[in-house]
Amino acid sequence: MAFFINAKDIGNAYYHGLSDFLEVVDDDVKFNNVKEELNGTFGVTFATEIFTPVLQKLLCVDSLNEIVTGAHLRFGLKRLKVLNEASTKLIKNIPSYDARMSYHTTKDALSTCPLYYPSKGGVGQWTLALEKKLRDVGVKILCGRSILGMDSNDKTIQSLTLDDGVKVNCDILVWTVPLIFLFRAAEIKCKTERPSFVHTTLFHYVIDQPPLNQNHYLYCYEPNLLPFRVTLYSNLQSVISANTERHRVTVEVLSKEALDLENSKKDVWQDLIKMKLVAKKSNVLFQHTECIQQGFPKFTHEFVKSSKYQYDLAMDSFSNLSIQGKSNTKDWFMNDIFKSIYAEFGK
Ligand SMILES: Cc1cc2nc3c(=O)[nH]c(=O)nc-3n(C[C@H](O)[C@H](O)[C@H](O)COP(=O)(O)OP(=O)(O)OC[C@H]3O[C@@H](n4cnc5c(N)ncnc54)[C@H](O)[C@@H]3O)c2cc1C
């Protein structure tokens, strides 16, 4: 199964779309919004027939003009599957096409992809393992504290004052939570709007039958189906799932308005059956629903402008400050965050 959308699924418009797609050769264009970017990258037909409905579903917006460039990349929409396997392999030798076309199978990619997910427990094991490593080398970790104040001199942060009154001297401050809390502690005035978020709801199911699909996770781009992403934990922890005969499935749903949870959990389950991810005869042993308060931000021009403003204000205010995580304005995915931290501190 390939990760990317198969452009042939749009029917007759595919051939027109393919012609538009192949005629795009200019890589060096500056786009003002994601709509222009998709037109200029995949051609107008594929942009209109494929990306527009998909992104309207995922970003919960009516118009892509208000969305910044690169927003589609947050949802794994970097490439399209076009042509056939053999021609794709040949044409992918040309970098401009390689960047926009996907291989037809992921066989090779998956066989070389190591599985970092813990064999027992959840991804929280990573945090616990990192915490242990830090404590083992003598790092003192204070949980449940907040920073109330900050002393600085000539743009250099000297110390932080915690909510229990303790002062912590500071050589360098690495900040990984929203910058608004830094501004409050440092008494810096920052007038920006709170970002608005797409409603993100997680539907967890424990079922008595293994999933019908071998992927660890997959995206659902179909506008008529509720799921945005489905994670099949049995494929990540096959031994535990087989031994316990309990199979965990988590579905992420993005929506413009808050969902009616009672009805949605039934609809999402029906969608999983329609998508042939779970057997119709599976019994749901346990179900839990979670609303993520600060899920996906709306990747609008205002949001990006305001994040950049906050980042610049913080960095201009202090010389011994490092901003990591998604507040650094360039990273979003965990692997990019790790790479940035490694680039700054790991070498
Ligand atoms: C719904 C959703 C799904 C995602 N899925 C993926 C994915 O599958 N893969 C991927 O690579 N990326 C994914 N991301 C992107 C995600 O942003 C990054 O993977 C990563 O979690 C960002 O790390 P971070 O440390 O910057 O932010 P976070 O992981 O959000 O960590 C910030 C932490 O700061 C804490 N915090 C906030 N305010 C305060 C405060 N005042 N005091 C103390 N603590 C505070 C929060 O509780 C949180 O624990 C997803 C994002 C969202 C919203």
Image (cartoon, grey):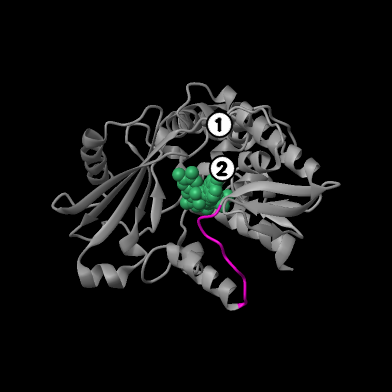
Give the farthest residue toward the bottom.
Answer: 136
Q: How far across and down, in percent of the image, does residue 132 sit? A: 52, 73
Q: Between residues 130 and 80, which one lies in front from this camera angle?
A: 130
Rendered location of residue 284, percent (x, y)? 17, 52
- Residue 41: x and y in percent read 62, 35
Q: In which quarter of the image is residue 317?
A: top right
Q: Please indicate, yes or no, whether residue 102 appears anywhere in the rendered image.
A: no
Q: Quadrant of the C terminus?
A: bottom right
Element on which disc 2 rests = helix
Please name the predominant secondary structure of the magenta segment in the image. loop
Q: Would residue 265 be found to the left or right of residue 184 on screen?
A: left
- Identify residue for label 2: 73
Instruction: Please name the amino acid that badge 1 sits on.
Output: Pro
Check residue 195 in the rendering and tell me which mark sits there, or answer none: 1
Task: Tell which of 242 and 78 is nearer to you.
Answer: 242
Q: Magenta residues, as a range?
A: 137-145
